[in-house]
């Protein structure tokens, strides 16, 4: 797995203007793909979703790379892209593989948060709140989930909740992004458990998911930037 790379002030300052322009173009392209995907889902136009969804995380990862972001963040987004593509396939094996790809992305995020995150007193009560939410959600969904998916979903939910909780150590943007990622995947899980769904459920899943990935990427980029609002070097753990 690629090591975390935090560009220093000198490196960021000397990045060619072409890279800055490319980053801006890629961000606009990502936003355009998000609008296209969400619009297609609202309109019930499946071909539009099939075209736009595979572009989303590729464009966001390319934007992060052009910004000189940590390679591990690019890897996390590419694992998200792999999950997106696999979930387009209507098969149990593809669903499990997609969940595994997302899980690998969460591991990358956890490594990033450990590297750049701060340790604050709020971590204890926030962790407790997320733990309660995890137990309550898994318990509520358990009986409705297909038997073969119960253990994988529970294990994935534990990893996802850990990522969402730790994201707040990077800053408010990443913290909201982690919470939205948890909400998005919970919406998917309620569909697996045959719970009543909102109108156009895929729209709400993708709305919360794309916002989550964008906010996580934004939060990490700010944390590694000397011009951002987060720490540029890891702080020691407090026991």
Image: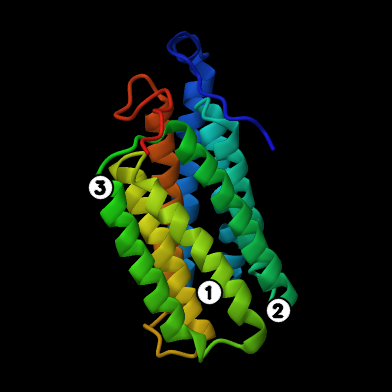
What's the distance in space between the residues labelled 3 and 2, CA to CA? Answer: 39 Å
Task: Tell me which numbered mark, 3 or 2, is placed earlier along the sequence.
Answer: 2
The disc placed on residue 122 is 3
The disc placed on residue 45 is 1
Given this view, does label 2 or label 1 mark the residue nearer the observer? 2
Closer-to-camera residue (110/178): 110
Q: Do residues under tags 3 and 2 come within 8 Å of each other at their CB atoms?
A: no
Other residues around mark 2 within 10 Å, as few (<14) / some (14–19) / many (≥20): few
Closer-to-camera residue (236/81): 236
What's the distance in space between the residues labelled 2 and 1, CA to CA? Answer: 24 Å
Given this view, does label 3 or label 2 mark the residue nearer the observer? 3
Identity of the residue drawn at 26% across and 55% down: 125
Q: Do residues under tags 2 and 1 come within 8 Å of each other at their CB atoms?
A: no
Residue designated by label 2: 92
The disc placed on residue 153 is none
Task: Tell me which numbered mark, 1 or 3, is placed earlier along the sequence.
Answer: 1
Q: Judging from the image, what secondary structure is the residue with disc 3 in?
A: helix
Give the percent coordinates (x, y) of residue 9. 43, 12
Q: Judging from the image, what secondary structure is the residue with disc 1 in?
A: loop
Is residue 188 something that shows in the picture?
yes
Horizontally, residue 138 falls left or right of residue 1, namely left
Task: Tell me which numbered mark, 2 or 1, is placed earlier along the sequence.
Answer: 1
Q: Judging from the image, what secondary structure is the residue with disc 2 in?
A: helix
Horizontally, residue 95 falls left or right of residue 236, namely right
């Amino acid at each position: 797995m690629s090591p975390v790379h935090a560009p220093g002030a000198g490196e960021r300052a000397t990045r060619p203007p072409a890279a800055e322009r490319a980053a801006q173009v890629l961000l606009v392209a990502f936003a355009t793909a998000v609008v296209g995907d969400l619009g297609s889902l609202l309109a019930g136009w499946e071909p539009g979703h099939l075209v736009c969804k595979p572009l989303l995380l590729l464009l966001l990862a390319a934007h992060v790379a052009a910004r000189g972001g940590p390679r591990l963040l690019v890897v996390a987004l590419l694992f998200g892209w792999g999950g997106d593509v696999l979930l387009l396939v209507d098969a149990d094996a593809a669903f499990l593989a997609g969940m595994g790809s997302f899980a690998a992305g969460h591991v990358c995020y956890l490594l990033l948060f450990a590297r750049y995150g701060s340790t604050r007193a709020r971590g204890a009560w926030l962790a407790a709140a997320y733990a309660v939410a995890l137990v309550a959600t898994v318990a509520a969904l358990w009986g409705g989930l297909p038997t073969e998916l119960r253990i994988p979903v529970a294990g994935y939910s534990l990893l996802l909740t850990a990522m969402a909780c730790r994201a707040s150590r990077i800053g408010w943007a990443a913290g909201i992004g982690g919470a939205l990622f948890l909400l998005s995947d919970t919406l998917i899980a309620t569909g697996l458990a045959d719970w009543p769904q909102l109108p156009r459920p895929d729209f709400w899943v993708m709305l919360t998911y794309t916002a989550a990935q964008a906010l996580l990427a934004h939060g990490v980029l700010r944390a590694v930037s000397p011009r951002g609002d987060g720490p540029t070097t890891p702080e020691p753990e407090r026991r």
